[in-house]
Amino acid sequence: MTIEFSNFTFKYWALEKPTLKNINLTIGKGEKVVIVGPSGSGKSTLGQCLNGLIPFAVKGDCTGSLKINGKDTKSLDLHQCTNIVGTVLQDTDGQFVGLSVGEDIAFALENQMVIQEEMHTIVKETAKMVELDDILDVSPFDLSGGQKQRVSLAGVMVDDVDILLFDEPLASLDPKTGKAAIDIIDHLHHDTGKTVIIIEHRLEDVLHRPVDRIIMMEQGEIVANMTPDQLIASDLLEQHGIREPLYISALKAAGCQITEDDKPAYFSTLNLDKFKPQIENWYRQSSAECTPENSERLLTVNNLSYSYDGIKNTLEDVNFHINKGEFVSILGKNGSGKSTITRLIMGVLEPDTGSIFMNGQDLVQSSIFERSQKIGIVLQNPNHMISHHMIFDEIASGLRNRGIDESTVERKVFDILELCGLKKYRHWPIDALSYGQKKRVTIATILVLEPELLILDEPTAGQDYHHYTLMMEFVRELNRKLGITILIISHDMHLVLEYTQRAIVIADSQLLADAPVNTIFSQPALLEKANLTVTSLYSLAYAMGINRIDNFIHCFIEHEAKNK
């Protein structure tokens, strides 16, 4: 099932300029390719052209041609396209059609009129592959972000299509589940010979399993079409704001020169002996001094327990504190209770037992509105926060609700737009933005209010490395210069490693650990228990025979902080 773009250009009717420009690309039958690029580069638009959403559901002007197996897609309809291309969307809420997980997985089979007995068997087997077999009767809308992604993945896996398109399949998945998803996609590719296209920001995680090619996009154009080794050895990732594998960053920090012949795309194929002297020398010379901790408490969580159904605790007797000015992360697998903590802090939920104090005051005495004056939260899904049509009005809404005069509102909004990399979009409607761009709008909407405690729930979901780095550097400046305390709820190990000083690890409703990030990241058994995985930085230090891996990780963190 060959895919061929020839001089293909597409412009949304709502925009003046094309989103895709003169695309020439061929993907052969049975190939497995990855498409990377910054937010707004046209990756998802390219995917929508493949699955027929463009031009049949999303209107715009097309020139050139897109042929699938020799047939121009203009001669097909949406139904014919979806019978050829199965898609796992980035925004999973927009993909659910069933009232339960089982019904949603079975949807494609029902359309194919598969007999009931066979359908039940296929659904159960597929659900087991993605660890959903014990929640088949649950509504998909009641699941965590990662669980929703797995439901969507299962729904495509049961469908008999020739091309599988995954639009950021890892966006909401914890590291261990993400690896499992990549394994499943790889097995599907090998077992069925289907063409697989993966659109993803998390390049290192995708390269957990081999791919044939990586296609890089920038401003609607293809700027690279290479093997993984060629791309990783080049400087194109850095040039275009794509996060390189962590072990590559560590090798570069030690002054190592990496070439295509080193086979750098996969840690398992890299010749580490060549680089060992430089790594050891860099480690010996690096300083690993710890920053003293501010001991003044801002938030204290005491014996916190909560259950959604009154039977099984989502959180059980959780205790931790956050000091003023800290930059802290809460880590854990999907469904572990991380986001529940946020809802309890904000007052959306009330704890079954326990208490939460802020600045020494029990938050049970404060309304949701009163809490929002001191605590800002950015939710995982931007569509759950957006309430205005235009970007400027969305970011200005909180200031206007506080009665701030319009000249001050305009100044503050423009400052935030520039700092968040959104200035050129200030007159755009929000509907014209990509998922990652919407994410930045919601973060800007909260940051403009300058909260005392800022909670970011999965801030990197749907965000490219360049823009989330700009955003997180701004957040770090707020932390350092204004003393705003930052709490990140995430399973993005890279984000936690780069920005946070301390990590609180939660799994299966209980707090497993509360320690400096370098200490947490050097304990494989602990990370495994929390459905997290060791980073390739740990793997590099371990392979090099370094005894104090926690010190090695700390040295790398310090190096990265100095070179931002």
Image (spheres, grey):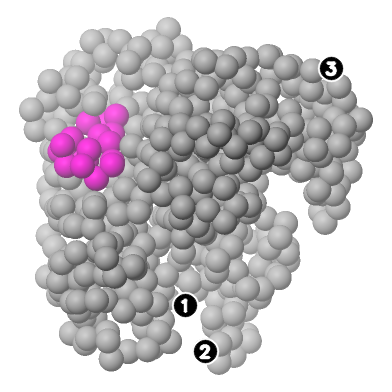
What residue would you read off at disc 2? Answer: 402
| Residue interval drawn in magenta | 521-538
Q: In the picture, which quadrant includes the N terminus?
A: top right
Q: Which callout, 2 or 1, points at the residue further toward the start of the chain?
A: 2
Give me the disc on residue 349. none
Residue 4 appears in the picture as rendered: no
Q: Where is residue 249 in the image (x, y as percent from the top left)?
A: 35, 31
What is the secondary structure assignment of the residue under circle 1?
loop
Question: Looking at the picture, does residue 473 appear above or below residue 117?
Answer: below
Q: Are marks 2 and 1 in contact (CB under 8 Å)?
A: yes
Residue 208 appears in the picture as rendered: yes
Give the residue drawn at x 16%, y 52%.
512
Residue at the farthest top position: 261
What is the secondary structure assignment of the residue under circle 2?
loop
Q: What residue type is labelled 3?
A: Gly
Q: What residue type is labelled 1?
A: Leu
Towards the viewer: 96 or 495: 96
Q: Which callout, 3 or 1, points at the residue further toward the start of the chain?
A: 3
| Number of numbered callouts drawn | 3
Q: What residue type is labelled 2?
A: Arg
Q: State the separation of the CA atoms marked 2 and 1.
A: 9 Å
What residue would you read off at disc 3? Answer: 70
Q: Within 10 angstroms of label 3, few (less than 14), some, or many (20 or more) residues?
A: few
- In the rendered structure, the answer to whether residue 68 lies left or right of residue 558 reads right
What residue would you read off at disc 1? Answer: 449
Residue 457 within the segment the image draws in magenta? no
Q: State the separation of the CA atoms marked 3 and 1.
A: 54 Å
Question: Looking at the picture, does residue 141 appear above or below residue 358?
Answer: above
Q: Where is residue 544 in the image (x, y as percent from the top left)?
A: 17, 19
